[in-house]
Image: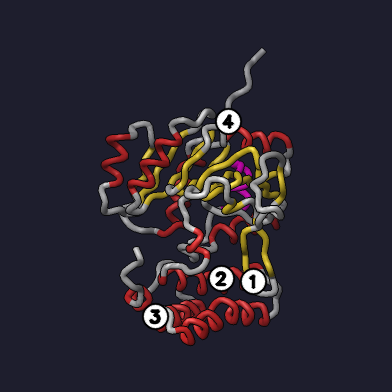
Amino acid sequence: MVASRRPDIALVLLNWNGWEDTRECLQSLRAVTAPCRIILVDNGSTDDSVERAREQFPEVEIIDNRANLGFAEGNNRGIRHALSTGADYVMLLNNDTLVDPHFLEPLVAAFDRDPAVGFASPVILYADEPEAVWFCGGEIDWRTGWAHHRQPPDGVAPTHGITSTPIATGCCLIAARATWEQVGLFDPRFFLFWEDSDWTLRATRAGRAGVVVAESRIWHKVSRSFRRGMPTLGTFYFVRNGLLFVRKHGPRHPLVALRFLSAWALRPSLREARRREGAWLRMALLRAAGVLAYVTGSFGAAPAPAVRLTVRRDR
């Protein structure tokens, strides 16, 4: 009897000036029990990330982009390399995560159980609150065009079972080779934010079902305050790319875009102005810049005027 071949799992890890997080993530990946190869994609870091990775993690494949291509195209470089070198599954993983040693096996098993599954995600928990759920599925509210995380009804992370989801987060996402080949890669116009919702919704609408596997879990280093207010340049990308997402996927009705603008640009700016919150004027200008960029078709990396508006706390 001929033994069945183990699937080739390629894990793409994107880094941009985040060596300490990347190092901790790579260390956690060394304990993973399912065989996988790691492809570290560096987006032009200036903190010696590439040199440190080569020295401390010689087993890792490295792609040095020498420029910040954004989350979308940076990951695309890794995905292309993985597929061209024979990967059966390609996973994307944020560098600011820590993984359970057994997180891969349940994800791959989901594809074996159901041929309709095209992509899968683990349950993602907060690193600083290890039992609190950050992601266990997503959905879209087409009244406002908002793609958001689904929370468990009782607030407790599920530990067993598989649930369907039309969208998933690029924080941790694995897809079968056939799905990548059918759906294509990330839309580079997004650069940062919304590219994962766009890709997974494209996959879902192409008949490639998405699932969350409760037996698989990782921990994400994101604070709860991130949900209350993004760094300012992130606000530019959120508004511009949200409008692009609505145009690509939403109901063909201008009210959806207007509701999105009201909910995520106009009302936040008015609220911050009334309260004189921090850099409220800069935030309002960045939201306006996002709208202008969308209207004029300026996609990809944020234009220089928007970058100059960012406050010092931005990276």
Along the line of sight, which residue is nearer the eye, 17 or 58?
Answer: 17
The residue type indicated by label 3 comes to: Arg
Q: Return the disc, 1 or 3, that comes first in the chain's sequence.
A: 1
Q: Which mark is nearer the camera, 4 or 3?
A: 3
Q: Are marks 2 and 4 in contact (CB under 8 Å)?
A: no
Q: Are marks 2 and 1 in contact (CB under 8 Å)?
A: yes
Q: Are marks 1 and 3 in contact (CB under 8 Å)?
A: no
> Label 4 belongs to which residue?
7
Q: Which mark is nearer the camera, 1 or 3?
A: 3
Q: Is residue 17 left or right of residue 242?
A: left
Could you say where residue 62 lies in the image, as x and y percent from the top left?
36, 41
Q: Label 4 to label 3, Cα distance in Å?
A: 49 Å
Residue 171 in view of the camera: yes
**Which image quarter: residue 204?**
bottom right
Q: Secondary structure at mark 4?
A: loop
> Label 2 belongs to which residue?
242
Could you say where residue 112 lies in the image, as x and y percent from the top left?
69, 34
Q: Label 2 to label 3, Cα distance in Å?
A: 19 Å
**Which image quarter: residue 103?**
top right
Q: Residue at x 46, y 63 (%)?
A: 191
Q: Magenta region: which residues?
A: 175-184
Quadrant where the C terminus is found in the figure: bottom left
The residue type indicated by label 1 comes to: Gly
Q: Which mark is nearer the camera, 1 or 4?
A: 1
